[in-house]
């Protein structure tokens, strides 16, 4: 039972990094890694895929979600984008159940992470009928790196 309680507390603390904080400590939107970078077998050496889940408890007026796959360069001093999803337009405003956005790149050996950023306008906690801009990244604790070795192509 203690394990379940600790898990619930951990999930609540992780959620507290989200955007759109309103009076009383509630949150409007959040983004989290849904699937960390991993190899997917396929044509050639296959692909590397990752996914992010975004959700909004209260629908914002505008919402854009940018998701990219990054590879480590210079011994971790720099991350370089290798693939980006299309920004999701207003028609895909995340619901409380969330939306999942995938990003895919051709497989190359390296250390990868997924990065995401959400921006838009939503309810202002300081007054009904007002909107407030938001712009926030995927929390740092969600961006851990994974080493991926692609299989050799058999000739």
Image: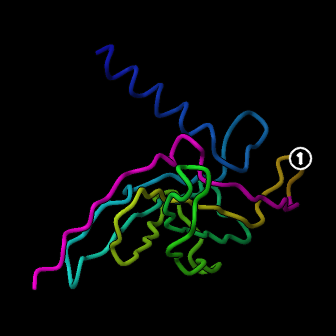
Question: Which quadrant, please, contains the N terminus?
Answer: top left
Looking at the rendering, the stretch of residues picked out in magenta corresponds to: 129-155
Measuring from the top left, give residue 151's x and y in whole percent. 19, 69
Determine the residue located farthest toward the left in the rendered image: 155
> Could you say which is closer to the camera, residue 84 or residue 58?
84
Could you say whether the residue bearing mark 1 is in a helix, strand or loop? loop
Question: Which quadrant, please, contains the C terminus?
Answer: bottom left
Q: Is residue 153 magenta?
A: yes
Q: Residue at point 84% right, 62% down?
A: 131
Q: Residue at point 61% right, 56% down?
A: 78
Measuring from the top left, give residue 54's x and y in whole percent. 53, 60
Measuring from the top left, give residue 144's x and y in whole percent. 47, 46
Q: Residue at point 67% right, 70% down?
A: 63
> Could you say which is closer to the camera, residue 70 or residue 63?
70
Crowd around label 1: few <14 · some 14–19 · many ≥20 (10 Å): few
Q: Is residue 76 magenta?
A: no
Measuring from the top left, give residue 153's x and y in whole percent. 17, 79
Q: Which residue is mark 1?
A: 126
- Taking 8 as reference, is 111 above or below it? below
The quadrant holding residue 3 is top left
The quadrant holding residue 81 is bottom right
Left or right of residue 22: residue 80: left
Left or right of residue 4: residue 67: right
- Taking 152 as reference, is 73 above or below it? above
Left or right of residue 34: residue 139: right
Q: What's the image's color scheme?
A: rainbow
> Could you say which is closer to the camera, residue 47 or residue 128?
47
């Amino acid at each position: 039972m203690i394990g379940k309680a600790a898990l619930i507390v951990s999930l609540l603390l992780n959620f507290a990094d989200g955007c759109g904080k309103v009076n009383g400590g509630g949150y409007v939107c959040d983004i989290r890694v849904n699937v960390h970078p991993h190899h997917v077998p396929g044509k050639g050496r296959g692909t590397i895929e990752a996914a992010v889940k975004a959700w909004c408890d209260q629908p914002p007026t505008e919402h854009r979600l940018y998701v990219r796959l990054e590879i480590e360069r210079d011994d971790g001093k720099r991350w370089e984008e290798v693939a980006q999803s299309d920004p999701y337009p207003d028609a895909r405003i995340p619901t409380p159940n969330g939306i999942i956005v995938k990003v895919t790149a051709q497989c190359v050996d390296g250390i990868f992470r997924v990065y995401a950023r959400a921006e838009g306008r939503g309810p202002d906690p300081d007054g009904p009928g007002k909107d407030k801009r938001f712009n926030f990244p995927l929390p740092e604790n969600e961006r851990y790196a994974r080493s991926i070795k692609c299989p050799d192509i058999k000739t």
